[in-house]
Image (tube, rainbow, N blue to C red):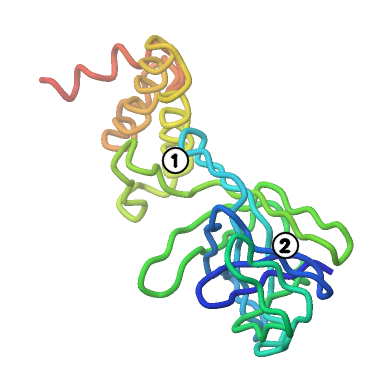
Amino acid sequence: MEYLAKKHGLWLEGAYSHLRLITPPPVVLPFSLNSGVNGNVYVFCEDYFDSATRVRRGRLYQSSGRDGDRFENVSLFPYPSPSKGCPIDEIYETANLNIKAGQEVILGDNLAQTCWTVVLAERRGRDAYYITLKSKTFLGVLPELLSEEIPPNNREDIHRAMNAVVEAASVQAPQPVIDACRVAATHMLLAMYPQITKKRAGANSREAGQWVVYPVCR
């Protein structure tokens, strides 16, 4: 089983028989499910983060109930390592959860939280629990949507179109980004002016992006 431990603000990892210092210091965040979890405390240890794709990958741990245990073999290099064992302040073990793709999770505590969607959840027995997340927010690329203000029938289309804009903005050439923006604007205007949906052009077409502007500009 893999362990994640904390001693004097330093994070360590490894097996129960040997813990080693993690360098550089990892990002470790409280983890919870929107649907709630059992009484254990869960933490997410980040291994990878890409702000362009808004994807975060890391390992999931749960409280082990062994806080204060003394570990005989602890390596704190380059700091001095204890010669007669080392009591650990906090210790977590590989999480024992059944998380499915598509579930919503929360990183952070009550004072500062972010919402993520599970893309992949992979287990290697009790040795490791890997989880890949995608942000539910636009990370500042665009203003966040006020979902409650969007008509229910248009909500999914607008969210999908805005996600396409954010994903295109950092990796695509200008023209595909413009096309994605045109489609997103079309969906928004169709939500604001449902009467124009009677026009013959579809909301996803380039033609719609051209004619849908006129009722707003007049």
Q: Which of the numbered marks, if any, corresponds to residue 148?
A: none
Residue 91, picture quadrant: bottom right
The residue where tag 1 is placed is 159
Residue 148 lies, in percent from the top left, at 34, 56
Q: Which one is nearer the viewer's eye here, 52 or 68?
A: 68
Q: Quadrant of the C terminus?
A: top left
Residue 218 is left or right of residue 200, and the answer is: left
Under mark 1, the amino acid is His
Q: Does residue 89 lie above or below 192 as drawn?
A: below
Residue 42, picture quadrant: bottom right
The residue where tag 2 is placed is 99
Q: Does residue 86 lie above or below 175 as drawn?
A: below
Residue 24 lies, in percent from the top left, at 55, 53
Residue 155 lies, in percent from the top left, at 43, 44
Q: Does residue 87 lie above or below 134 as drawn?
A: below
Residue 36 lies, in percent from the top left, at 60, 76
Residue at 35 percent of width and 23 percent of height: 181
Classify mark 1: helix, strand or loop. helix
